[in-house]
Image (cartoon, helix red, strand yellow):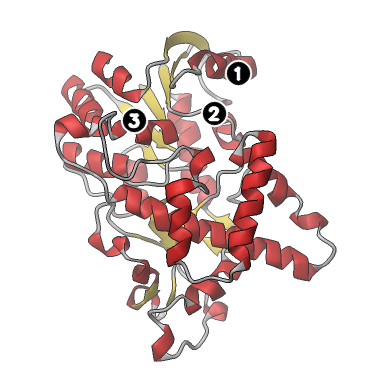
Amino acid sequence: MKIFVFGAGASRGSQGKNFSGLKSPLVDDFFTGTYKAVLDGIDFLPHYRREIDGLNEEKKKCNSLEIALTSRWDQITRQPSINHQEAEKSFFGFCVYYIWSFLKDISNTYSSADNENFYKAFLNKLYAQKEPFGIINFNYDTLLDQAYQEVFNASLVSIQKYKDLNFIKPHGSVNWFLNPKGNEYIKFYESEINTQAPLLYATSLVFEARSLEESLIARPDSPDIRSPSFLVGRNFNSQFGIPLILLPLSSKQYSHIAGFSEGIIDKGRALLAGAKEIYLIGYKASDDVIHEMLENTPVGCLLHVINQGSAKEIMDNVLAKHKQLKKGSMCDGGFEDFVSRY
C-alpha cells in the first residue's frame, strides 16, 4: 500500500502557482501578514494582539513558529502560580480559535476546476490507478477532504468514516469540533449568543479533559462552518463549540482528548505498518507524532519526499531516525510539479 502524508506545503501547492485568492499558508506564516488580519474580526482581549506580536518576535529568533510555540507551551508548568498557568492555557486556547478562523476561509477557496485544483488532479490519478492507498493529512484545512469527497463520491461525516476510508488527520480539522461538558455550561443571555462572549469563555477550556466520542463532525464542504457564528448557539445547545485543532507543536498535545490516540494515532500507525511506499508531500516531519507512527514501518519500505527546495534535508533527517526505511525519490519542485509527473 502507498501512504501519502500531506503537510502545509501540499495545500499551498494544491491551489496552483497562478492562484490569486487567499493562499494557504505555511506554518511559519500563521501569525503574519494577511492571516494576522483575521484578528481585526475577533473581539478578544486586546492583550492577545500583543501576545501574538511577542510570539512573532520569538519566531524570528529561532526561525520557526513550531519551535517558538513548543518552547512557550513547555514553560506552562514552570509558571509561578496556577493563575499564570491558566492564563497561558487561555492564550493557547485563543490560538486554536484564531487558526480555525482563517483556515476555514482557506477551505472556502476550494475549486472544482481540474486545472485549478491539484489535490483533485492528484486524486483523479489515484482513482484511475485502482490501487490501495492511505492518506495522513496534517493540514487543518479541508481542501484535500473536499477533493476526496468529489473524486471518490465519499461523505466524510464522522471520525469513523474518515478512518474507514484510510484518511486520518492527526492534527485535527476545521470541520471537527468538541462539545462542552455538562459542568462547563454557563447561562448566556440571548443578546450574547451571537457575540464573542461564549468564545472568550471557551478559550480557557480548550485544554480541559474531553473525549473524541463527544465530537461533532461537519461536512468538509459545509457552508455552515464558513461563519464564526457556527461555534455558538444551536449547534452546541446554545453554548460554544471547541475546534478540534491541535496546535503546530513538535511535542504531543492530544493527551487531554480521550480516545484520540487510540482512534487516530493508532490508525496512522496501522497504515504505515502496512506501507510499501511512503510519500512525504509538503511536510517537514518535524513533530513527534509522525515519528511515533513511523516506528513500525516495514524494513525496506521506500520513502519519497516532495518539498519545495528542501527534499534532501527532510529525507536525511527521517532516514537518520528510521533506519528501516529505504531512500526513494526526491522532488524539489513542489506539489504541482509532483502531480504532473506522477
Mark with earlier residue (2, 3): 3
Left or right of 299: which side holds 38? left
Q: In this view, does 81 lie to the left or right of 142?
A: right
User: Given the image, on which type of amino acid does mark 2 rest?
Assistant: Ala
Q: Could you classify mark 3 by the number of other residues whose Cα lies within 10 Å: few (under 14), some (14-19), or many (20 or more)? A: many
Q: Which numbered dot is residue 13? A: 3
Instruction: Find residue 331 and report its horizontal and vertical position in percent.
Output: 40, 14
Mark 1 vs mark 3, foreground winner is: 3
Taking the spot 30% from the left edge, 39% from the top edge, the residue there is 144
**Reading the chain from its start, which is encountered first: label 1 or label 3?**
3
Q: Which residue is drawn at 62% across and 53% down?
A: 53
Among the two numbered marks 1 and 2 on one chain, the one whose residue lies closer to the N terminus? 2
Q: Decide if residue 171 is on the left or right side of residue 226.
A: right
**Rendered image quadrant of residue 314:** top right
Q: Which amino acid does label 1 sit on?
A: Asn
Residue 228, percent from left and from top:
37, 67
Looking at the image, residue 256 sits to the left or right of residue 26; the answer is right
Whether label 1 touches label 2, CB < 8 Å: yes
Q: Looking at the image, do the residues carrying marks 2 and 3 touch, with CB atoms under 8 Å apart? A: no
Residue 21 is situated, as x and y percent measured from the top left of the image, at 28, 43
How far apart marks 1 and 3 lie (CA) works out to 23 Å
Which amino acid type is marked by label 3?
Answer: Gly
Which residue is identified by label 1? 317
Q: Is mark 1 on a helix, strand or loop?
A: helix
- Badge 2 is on which residue? 285
Q: Residue at x 64, y 58 (%)?
A: 51
In what quadrant of the picture does the C terminus appear? top left
Nearest the viewer among 220 and 22 is 22
